[in-house]
Amino acid sequence: MKNGFTTGSCAAAAAKAAAYMLLSGKEKSNIAITLPTGDKYCPKIEEIRTGESAVSCAVRKESGDDPDITNGVLVHAKVSFMEQPAAQRVVITGGTGVGKITRPGLDQPVGNAAINSVPRQMITQEVTEVMDLFDHAGSLLVEIFVPDGERLAAMTFNPRLGIEGGISIIGTTGIVEPMSTKALLDTIRVELTQQKAMGREAAVVSPGNYGFSFMKEHYGYDLDRAVKCANYIGDTIDMARSVGFRKMLVLGHIGKLIKVSGGIMNTHSKEADCRMELMASAAIRCGAETKVLQEILNCVATEEAIAILIREGIDKACFAQIMERIGYYLNKRGGGEMDIRCIVYANQYGLLGQTEGAEEFL
């Protein structure tokens, strides 16, 4: 699969090209930069605008085979002379379409442009290289802007994270690998870090939108205090522990969380299923007859199996068993360092079960 390049790489390349054109007085149609991996990135330079005191240009984002919302967007850099020398040789700011940080716990302080540390280092390194080439002793101002950034940001996690007004300029290696898993896990970690920085005592997580809806409708819970963990239950526990949480609540639909009662920590269907086997296992412990177990094993959806448990009058006992096993495996993954509780619901039947004291964490 084909790799792509991050918005940070695009910003650094555009900034270097703009600096070169400003200091040399010559246009530049291509530029080469060195990525943190040591690889070279040589993009085409577009939308060049020159002036005596400032030059701007753009690099088009190429995401490779990664399904990235920013694929094809133009990342611009405007480099200008500073009237007064600054403490830094290269001063970096964000313009139109680059988000601004409004909440703590992110890579940059509140009030800064959402240009992360590694892209800032890349921009500084590449622009400084050009300044040294032309023996420029003063300071240069680099403004990164993305004309389409505000529109694109509405389709990302940025508004939820407290990044307003545009996209983020990100990347740790400079390269976009064609896998969305890492990007999603990175986002989960950012949200957990942010919740911790805002003083939350317990991490409240749910696999998806249905869980969020249940929190809001049944508990009136402020969803800005919750983190969506998708299928990555185990990884989310690991990350919550690493950022300092000692309490955690997992709230989700039975279709996902029944798997956790069997110790399955990635609930994606391509990783594991066993939903009906685990429902049948709980029914066995509650005295269900063989024909009932066969019915459960033949079910397609968990809510279909719940109807059988209710019909047999063993639903409460079964979910007591299921919640006990879920609690065991969640806390086992927590390594004895976390108190993890759980609430399980179904769309049709509402609350099915919870471990002891789970609602306290809401």
Image (cartoon, helix red, strand yellow):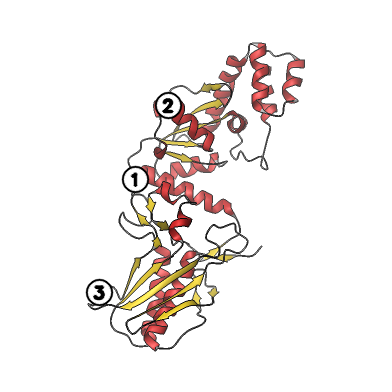
Tell me whether the residue at label 2 lies in contact with that at label 3, contact meaning CB atoms closer than 8 angstroms. Answer: no
Up-down relation of residue 135 to residue 80 (above or below) = below
> Which callout, 3 or 1, points to the residue nearer the camera?
3
- The residues bearing labels 1 and 2 have C-alpha atoms spaced at a distance of 24 Å
**Residue depicted at x 71% and y 29%:** 300
Q: Is residue 129 placed above or below 148 in the rendered structure?
A: below
Could you say whether the residue bearing mark 3 is in a helix, strand or loop? Answer: loop
Mark 2 or 3 closer to N-term?
A: 3
Locate residue 61 relative to residue 1 in the image: left or right.
left
Label 2: which secondary element:
helix
Q: Is residue 12 above or below residue 197?
A: below
Give the foreground label among 1 and 2: 2
Kind of residue sitting beneath label 1: Ala
Mark 3 and mark 1: span between their CA atoms?
Answer: 31 Å
In this rendered view, identify the residue nearer to me: 297 or 287.
297
x, y percent for residue 305: 67, 22
Residue corresponding to mark 3: 86
The residue positioned 43% from the left and 49% from the top of the image is 190
Q: Check disc 1 and report the residue beneath it.
A: 197
Which one is in front, 44 or 278? Answer: 44
Disc nearer the start of the sequence (3/1):
3
Residue 341 visible in the picture? no
Residue named by callout 2: 219
User: As drawn, which residue projects farthest toward the left?
Assistant: 84
Q: Amino acid at mark 3?
A: Ala
**Residue 5, x across and y down, in percent:** 54, 66
Is 299 on the left-hand or right-hand side of 173? Answer: right
